Amino acid sequence: MSTRTHARKDASSEAIQAPRLRTLLLTDLCDSTALVERIGDNAAAALFREHDRLVVKLQQHWRGRLIDRSDGLLLLFDRPIDGLGFALDYARGLKTMGDANTLTLCARQGLHVGEVLTWRNSEEAVSIGAKPLEVEGLAKPTAARLMSMARPGQILVSAVAESLTHRAARELADRADRLLWKSHGRWRLKGIPTAMEIYEVGEVGLAPLRMPKNSAKAWRDVPLWRRPAALVAEVGVILAVGGAVWFFIRPQPAIAFANRDWVVVGDVRNLTGNTVLDGALEQALRISLEQSRYVNVLSDMK
């Protein structure tokens, strides 16, 4: 059994607190491993130290609690608008850091509001690697799903988080006028029993405003009749019904010319002596014959 597992087993110095409504923000620094390989260990260490200073500064400003960190962050906030404020400042801070170092730095972020259970680990457990505070509950994997489906630089929020942050957006002062809010429709998240509306929030010039990609862990919840297999079936049914209707209402064809065993070649002569009737008589005869279902009239050219 690993040291970390022992730490969690010995972490019962404080009872699990009653569920509380909290805002969870999960972030993931995009392509961090490739970044280290590209710029080297020393430059990466200096960059990550600068990144950590940014996180601490924003954490203090937005009253967040850092629960866990590696390539990404797990933060807890009392208010949704504080979580959104952190996410927006974090996105802008990464861009500023990247521009200063001629790098592309961005993160995927997922924001959700829900009930969580928390408990503190013992000092002994913390001393051997456990986190000071543990957080569990369905809200945690929900925020993780939002983060994982986000594109680089994208902040995705659940419907409940969008409602609460949108209403309090004026607390962000002038930045509220630069915010973009976009619905990406209803999605199914693996492990989450019900579909949820997913929104994107971001600043002009920073937010990708693109539909997240379908994956094995998150996919669009589209009506049955709009799914590809159903659309193919619908087209097939329409073609079948249309063909059947045409078969029953189509006009009866005239006797085919090739099936006739006789051909009549005729001409019209005006014996009245009135030249005005020359063309009229021929045209009248042709029209009357063409109206018959039993006669094929060929043009003079044939």
Image (cartoon, grey):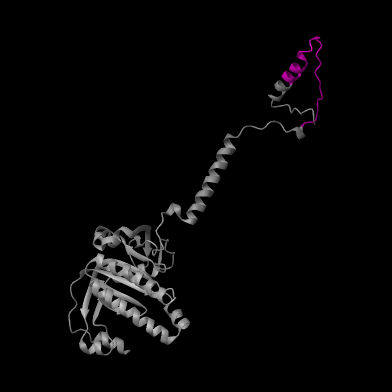
- The answer to whether 295 appears left or right of 131 in the picture is right
Question: Does 266 appear in magenta?
Answer: yes
Is 254 or 195 nearer to us in this picture? 195
Task: Please state the horizontal and vertical placement of residue 64, each as a whole percent of the image.
Answer: 24, 73
Residue 184 quadrant: bottom left
Task: Please state the horizontal and vertical placement of residue 247, each as a whole percent of the image.
Answer: 59, 38
Residues drawn in magenta: 260-285
Report whether residue 71 is seen.
yes
Is 292 or 194 nearer to us in this picture? 194
Is 36 or 92 nearer to us in this picture? 92
Q: Is residue 35 above or below residue 271?
A: below
The residue at 53%/43% (across/down) is: 241
Query: Count of labels shown?
Result: 0
Task: Please state the horizontal and vertical placement of residue 298, each as a whole percent of the image.
Answer: 76, 29
For the C terminus, give its image quadrant.
top right
Report whether residue 141 is seen.
no
The residue at 40%/63% (across/down) is: 205
Residue 151 quadrant: bottom left
The residue at 75%/16% (across/down) is: 281
Task: Please state the horizontal and vertical placement of residue 153, each as a whole percent of the image.
Answer: 39, 68
The residue at 31%/76% (across/down) is: 54
Question: Does 280 appear in magenta?
Answer: yes
Q: Is residue 142 above or below residue 260?
A: below
> How would you classify the magenta stretch by its main secondary structure?
loop
Is 45 or 183 nearer to us in this picture? 45
Residue 252 quadrant: top right
Q: Is residue 271 above or below residue 137?
A: above
For the N terminus, give its image quadrant.
bottom left
